[in-house]
């Protein structure tokens, strides 16, 4: 048996023949006629500024095309879509997609035609009066800080979202929520961009769709605030009420940056006379109020004696 060695020239020749055969085969195949089903975008035209879609509609239409293989292969590279104009629709319009292949917009460069509309078969385009309003954002994150730190505040930017949609829904919308996440072992402030939670049962547009959230994490601190006045509210005009003592100390816990500049003017200690006092009462509790973001507040003393007497008439 004789072994023949194949030269490099023969290998190259064979490869060229195979490649040319493949190219010839591919050219023949690409010029044949085929049927091909593909999903294309559904575009809605609405020049009516008063009415808008009430419910979501499918984003895609499945269309069967016929044409040369090369043109069908190029379909995904061109802007082909199914277009529906609802500008002149009143309250609703039922459209049978299969009856309107002319709504498929095909670029002139592609020599293909629509064979059939596979799905959806029918859509009810229901419209409602358009409404736009800003809706505040709410966010309640699950965040666990490292010992010795505390979450002072959660600040979204922007703090409200412009919602455009059907009046029957937008008029009832009072808050929007962000997609929630859990955060563990946090020991410093940080920012994160979070998407809003959209209502999928109605057709709405949200601007913007994402919000930057600042998580104000600070080292936990304590501070004593002295000489905070005690105020008595809702006192009848015929009575004069004096609290004992009239000044108190407050023990406050919160973020170190918040407490650094806190003074007595940032706190209100109040006793609601009409609610908390009645004849025979010896001591009452006060309520502490502040606009500062703090964790805990306590007054010393916690209870107060009230001297109640009738006002003297002026002569």
Image (tube, rainbow, N blue to C red):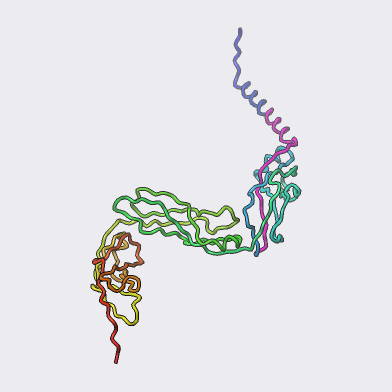
> Which residue appears farthest toward the front when viewing the image?
280
Res. 132 image quadrant: bottom right
Per the image, is 39 magenta?
Answer: yes
Q: Is residue 13 left or right of residue 67?
A: left
Query: Could you say which quadrant of the image residue 53 lies in?
Result: bottom right
Query: Residue 230 location, x and y as percent?
Result: 28, 72
Residue at the limit of the structure toward the top, as seen here? 1
Q: Is residue 187 above or below residue 49?
A: above
Q: Quadrant of residue 307?
A: bottom left
Closer to the camera, 192 or 137? 137
Count numbered badges in the picture.
0
Tell me where residue 36 appears, x and y as whole percent.
70, 39
Q: Is residue 243 magenta?
A: no
Is residue 111 visible to the viewer in this orientation of the structure? no
Task: Looking at the picture, tell me which residue is in the foreground, 257 or 304.
Answer: 304
Vertical position of residue 5 compared to residue 194: above or below: above
Q: Which residue is at the front of the view, 228 or 238? A: 238
* Residue appearing at x 29%, y 82% in the figure: 310
Identify which residue is drawn at 46% across, 60% down: 157
Q: Looking at the rendering, in which quadrant would you find the N terminus?
A: top right
Query: Which residue occupies the foreground of this view, 265 or 251?
Result: 251
Horizontal and vertical percent position of residue 277: 31, 72
Residue 236 vertical position relative to residue 190 in the rendered view, above or below: below
Query: Residue 145, position in %: x, y?
Result: 34, 51
Evaluate whether residue 172 shows in this view.
Answer: yes
Task: Tell me the quadrant of the picture where the C terminus can be found.
Answer: bottom left
User: Which residues fall within the magenta stretch?
Assistant: 20-48
Query: Which residue appears at 52% of the width and 56% of the height?
Result: 209
């Amino acid at each position: 048996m004789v072994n023949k060695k194949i030269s490099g020239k023969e290998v190259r020749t064979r490869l060229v023949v195979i490649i040319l055969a493949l190219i010839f085969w591919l050219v023949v195949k690409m010029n044949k006629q085929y049927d091909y089903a593909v999903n294309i975008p559904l575009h809605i035209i609405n020049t009516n500024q008063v009415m808008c879609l009430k419910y979501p509609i499918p984003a895609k239409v499945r269309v069967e095309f016929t044409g040369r293989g090369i043109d069908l292969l190029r379909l995904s590279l061109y802007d082909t879509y199914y277009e529906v104009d609802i500008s002149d629709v009143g309250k609703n319009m039922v459209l049978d997609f299969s009856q309107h292949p002319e709504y498929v917009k095909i670029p002139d460069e592609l020599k293909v035609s629509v064979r059939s509309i596979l799905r959806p078969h029918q859509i009810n385009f229901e419209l409602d009066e358009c409404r736009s309003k800003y809706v505040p954002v709410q966010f309640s994150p699950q965040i666990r800080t490292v010992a010795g730190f505390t979450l002072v505040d959660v600040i979204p930017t922007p703090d409200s979202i412009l919602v455009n949609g059907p009046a029957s829904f937008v008029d009832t919308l009072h808050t929007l929520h962000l997609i929630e996440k859990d955060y563990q072992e946090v020991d410093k402030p940080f920012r994160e961009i979070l998407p809003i939670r959209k209502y999928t049962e109605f057709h709405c547009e949200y601007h913007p769709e994402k919000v930057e959230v600042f998580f104000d994490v600070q080292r936990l601190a304590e501070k004593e605030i002295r000489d905070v006045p005690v105020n008595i509210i809702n006192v009848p005009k015929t009575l004069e009420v004096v609290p004992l003592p009239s000044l108190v100390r407050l023990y406050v816990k919160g973020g170190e940056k918040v407490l650094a500049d806190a003074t007595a003017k940032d706190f209100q200690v109040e006793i609601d006379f009409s609610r908390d006092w009645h004849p025979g009462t010896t001591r009452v509790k006060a309520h502490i109020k502040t606009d500062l973001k703090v964790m805990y507040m306590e007054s010393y003393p916690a209870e107060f004696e009230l001297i109640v007497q009738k006002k003297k008439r002026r002569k």
